Amino acid sequence: MNKNKRLKDEKINKICVIMLGLMGDVLLRTPLVREIRRLYPSSEIVAIVDPVGQHVLQHNHTIDRLIVMNRNRNNKYQYFSNKVLVQFQLLQEHFDLVIDLYGGKSTFRMMRLSNAKFQVGFKEGKKWVNQKHLQKYSDTDLRFANPHHLTNKLFQLLSFFEYYHDELDTTPEVAYTEKAYQNMQYYCKESNIENFFLVSLGSGGMEKILALSKMFNLIKKIYDEYHLVPAIVKNPGQEYLQEELIQAYLMPNNIPYFKLDVLNLDELVSMMQLSKFFIVPDTGLFHLAVGAKIPILCIFTHTNPLLVEPQHTTYESCFCPTSEVDLHDLPLGTSEIPDEILFSSVEKLIKKLK
């Protein structure tokens, strides 16, 4: 083996990328897969995902196939059986390269047991490669304009493939079908939905949800000043948020609204395309909107916006820092965001749109 070779020069025909995780996690990893596709344009790329990842990546053009691993622990026998079956498939398919983007102990073992010639991932939080002649690049740090972005940690794995010294694109890969777009056009027409902006209320972490009273004040400001009507997204598992906002705030104050049904990801991306802009907390739908290049007002009540700041979409963040810091030594936010900051953020966004 030529010890001066980087991975980009090796003959690699079949690649497996471990991309387990929730919607936002999966979307944050797609920019690295895009770079891997650029390095190996004719190789087959297979991704291991949870069921939610299947919905996120089903139309992704950089990935050829998906292996779905259901990690639901309600049935322990089924859980371990699913893990064994996926591990067996990893062995059976004889991948040349396995890349672990999940970075957990179980996925590291999964990668190690794959018997792939080349294995790249993270061990105890640090980038790792199995080939000794490539380990000298483990200390090579790549430089980025925004060093805080979460995707940049994944981009550091590219030092095993080739050097990068320019800004890599952190925009997630998002695809949707023309049929879904046409269906949502028809849905809007039949439901008289027009001149609207989208509002998503839910998030996996309750600390990321803005108080409904503050969200109402923001919606009222937009309706009164810009004559735009809110279309309220129904978040599965948190449908009560949509209902409470409508029943407790919009209806008593005579603010018109559109109450959306539960939409699949294709339909939701299409609705984003049809809307004026999207108000969303820091959650998976935010990353979906970033990938679809939708105008966004993202309300950060906890996470620092620098960690996920988009590059190629019209965007404003709403953030009120506190004295507390996160694991990256960046200030954490608070949900007690003054109305003045909310109003100022939406004014800046609409000014950009004009």
Image: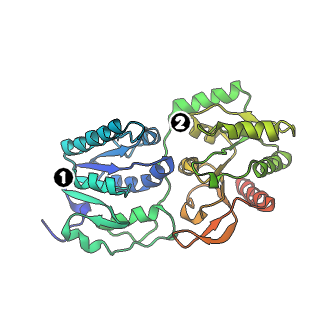
Give whichever of discs 1 and 2 has the lower sequence position: 1
Q: Amino acid at mark 1?
A: Asn
* Residue located at (26% from left, 64% from top): 129
In-front residue for pair 121/36? 121
In-front residue for pair 60/153? 153
Quarter of the rendering containing residue 109: bottom left
Q: Tag on residue 115? A: 1
Q: Does residue 62 appear to the left or right of 227 in the view shown?
A: left
Q: Quadrant of the N terminus?
A: bottom left
Give the foreground label among 1 and 2. 1
Q: Does residue 297 appear to the left or right of 289 in the view shown?
A: right
* Residue located at (53% from left, 36% from top): 266
> In the figure, 244 relative to 211: above or below?
above
Q: Tag on residue 135? A: none
Q: Does residue 70 appear to the left or right of 89 in the view shown?
A: right
> In the figure, 95 relative to 118: above or below?
above
Circle 2 sits in a helix, a strand or a loop, which is it? helix
Q: Is residue 168 visible?
A: no
Q: Position of residue 130 (x, y in %)?
A: 22, 63
Quarter of the rendering containing residue 273: top right
Residue closest to the far left: 1
Q: Position of residue 277 (x, y in %)?
A: 68, 47
Q: Position of residue 348 (x, y in %)?
A: 74, 59
Quarter of the rendering containing residue 126: bottom left
Q: Amino acid at mark 2?
A: Asp
In-front residue for pair 23/266? 23
Q: CA distance from mark 1 to mark 2?
A: 36 Å
Circle 1 sits in a helix, a strand or a loop, which is it? loop
In-front residue for pair 87/343? 87
Q: Tag on residue 266? A: 2
